[in-house]
Amino acid sequence: MFDPFGDFSSMGYLRNSGAEKNLEIIKAVEHQLFRAQLPEALDFLARLKRIEYSDFLEVHRILFSGLYPWAGKDRAEVLPDRAVSKGSVFFCHPRDCRRAVQEGLFHAQDKKQIRTRSGFIMGMFAYGHPFLDGNGRTMLLVHAELCFRAGMSVDWTRTSKEPYLQSLTREIEDPNAGHLDAYLGPFISAKIPRESWLQSVAALPGLDGASAQSDTSAQYADPAVAASYQAFERRRGYKLA
């Protein structure tokens, strides 16, 4: 059980607004909120002249504030002293959430780069992992809008959950090797009209999070945790700008 605050017994999963402890119920509510708030989130992104980190946070707030009081706040604000990982893969230090996502956004504003490096950009969003939950759905919407502005799309309905997640994991571990670019390449197509997004995005398999591997957290003050994180960073071989 992912319990980074250490108060699951009194506050429920991730301090949700109802103090609910049943994870199946939580995931069902998350997914229903996502579907209900999807039109507002997409409209918000469409109105922006340029997408910034604050807008990335706002998309998350729009989607999940009905369940999580901390929605729209990143780990630097909510959980600044704990490492978050999934299996052997560490996400960035909370102080680097902004820089990781901003780097992805910087490359994505160049239409040529998002055409050729869409996987790298998605990987930077994933490595940034700003939120305690809802990262995948948030970055999917932002990425889709950025692709649309470049006159293209990723046809996510043709992708498969497990190969995608495996490629994403390898991308986070080794962002110089083009793992996710290679996976997404065959699914790049002409842009999909925004009015078609609601049906296609909401129906994607895996977005309900019901079978997702849980994150774990531990204090950076633990020497073993700090050493593991630093070793992972060295293996990545990629420095944030």
Image (tube, grey):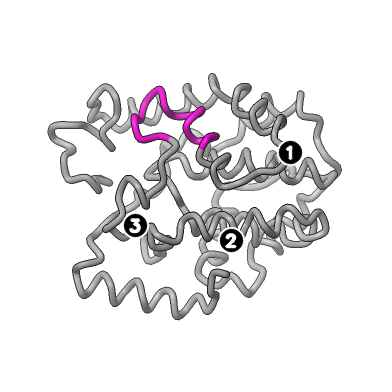
Q: Residues within 10 Å of mark 1 (few under 14, many from 20)?
A: few
- Decide if residue 159 is on the left or right side of residue 13: right
Q: Is residue 67 magenta?
A: yes
Is residue 21 depicted above or below 146 in this figure?
A: above
- Amino acid tagged 3: Val
- Amino acid tagged 2: Ser
Quadrant position of residue 183: bottom right
Q: Residues within 10 Å of mark 3 (few under 14, many from 20)?
A: many
Distance of mark 3 from mark 1, alpha carbons? Answer: 32 Å
- Residue located at (71% from left, 30% from top): 47
Q: Give the residues in magenta.
A: 58-71
Residue 84: mark in rendering? 3
- Between label 3 and label 2, give the one nearer the viewer: 3
- Decide if residue 57 is on the left or right side of residue 47: left
Label 1: which residue?
Answer: 49
Residue that lies at the very extreme toward the left in this rendered image? 10
Assign a secondary structure to mark 2: helix
Assign a secondary structure to mark 1: loop
- Residue located at (23% from left, 30% from top): 21
Q: Earlier in the sequence, mark 3 or mark 2?
A: 3
What quarter of the picture does the C terminus occupy?
bottom right
- Residue located at (54% from left, 42% from top): 54
Is residue 152 depicted above or below 84 in this figure?
A: above
